[in-house]
């Protein structure tokens, strides 16, 4: 009996690094955000997304799917700007300019401008995660309604796919990584709660 337990413990320690590597990844298309790089600030933002997503009627699977998609997009960094660019107000306020996405969801074009205008109307910083969650769920036009519907999903793969294709409309889907991210967040947040 002791020998079986010892073998199981040794195998667990040997396989743990492999599972961490497998759950990691190249991150988003523009922001490196492998799952092995989660810091305290990202974990704080993850908790805020988890709580707000559930307040908006999301299931565990649905909210974790959203987190997995946003992990791929921004590394769960509310202050992320595509490709690590710096803030330029003229570019940021140009709704016809693409490839200069902001925030958790990497809002671009008109959606980026709407986020910035919403922040100004609230006298808040666009980089605030609470403001971005309010924007995503309540002020992103028909995309807010769509988001609230999609986070009610009960199966991670289907929900990640729907969020990526319908809400995010990602240029590079990287679906396997998004699904891996979502499963990571589902397990992490359930184990913490």
Image: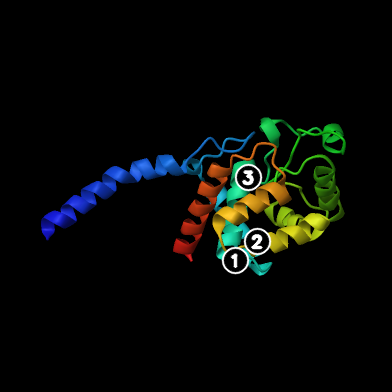
Q: Mark 2 and mark 3: span between their CA atoms?
A: 20 Å
Quadrant hosting residue 20: top left
Q: Choose between 150 and 122: the one closer to the eye.
A: 150
Decide if residue 135 is on the left or right side of residue 50. Answer: right
Q: Earlier in the sequence, mark 1 or mark 3?
A: 1
Q: Earlier in the sequence, mark 2 or mark 1?
A: 1
Decide if residue 6 is on the left or right side of residue 185. Answer: left
Residue 11 on image: x %, y %: 24, 47
Give the residue pinned by disc 3: 77
Q: Is residue 46 visible?
A: no
Measuring 68% from the left and 43% from the top, which residue is drawn there?
79
Measuring 70% from the left and 44% from the top, which residue is drawn there?
103
Q: What SS does tag 3 mark?
A: loop
Residue 171 on image: x %, y %: 70, 37
Quadrant hosting residue 109: top right
Whether residues under marks 1 and 3 lie with C-beta atoms below 8 angstroms apart, the answer is no
Whether residues under marks 2 and 1 lie with C-beta atoms below 8 angstroms apart, the answer is yes
Characterize the local packing of mark 1: few (<14), some (14-19) or many (20 or more) Cα atoms within 10 angstroms: some
Q: Is residue 85 visible?
A: yes
Q: Earlier in the sequence, mark 2 or mark 3?
A: 3
Decide if residue 191 is on the left or right side of residue 62. Answer: left
Badge nearest the viewer, 2 or 3: 2
Measuring 72% from the left and 58% from the top, which residue is drawn there?
147
Q: What SS does tag 2 mark?
A: loop
Q: Mark 1 and mark 3: span between their CA atoms?
A: 22 Å
Give the residue pinned by disc 1: 59
Residue 191 on image: x %, y %: 44, 62
Give the residue pinned by disc 2: 151
Badge nearest the viewer, 1 or 3: 1
Q: Choose between 126 and 163: the one closer to the eye.
A: 163
Q: What SS does tag 1 mark?
A: loop
């Amino acid at each position: 009996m002791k020998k079986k337990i010892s073998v199981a413990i040794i195998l667990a320690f040997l396989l743990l690094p492999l599972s961490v590597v497998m759950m990691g990844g190249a991150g988003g298309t523009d922001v490196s955000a492998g799952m092995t790089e989660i810091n305290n600030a990202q974990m704080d933002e993850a908790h805020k997304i988890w709580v707000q997503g559930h307040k908006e009627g999301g299931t565990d699977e649905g909210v974790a799917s959203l987190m997995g998609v946003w992990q791929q997009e921004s590394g769960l960094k509310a202050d992320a700007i595509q490709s690590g660019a710096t803030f330029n107000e003229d570019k940021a306020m140009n709704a016809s300019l693409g490839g200069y996405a902001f925030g958790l969801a990497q809002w671009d074009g008109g959606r980026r401008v709407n986020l910035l205008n919403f922040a100004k109307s609230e006298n808040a910083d666009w980089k605030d995660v609470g403001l971005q969650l309010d924007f995503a769920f309540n002020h992103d036009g028909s995309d807010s309604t769509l988001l609230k519907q999609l986070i009610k999903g009960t199966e991670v793969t289907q929900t990640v796919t729907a969020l990526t294709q319908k809400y995010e409309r990602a240029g590079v889907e990287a679906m396997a990584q998004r699904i891996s991210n979502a499963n990571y967040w589902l397990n992490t947040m359930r184990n913490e709660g």
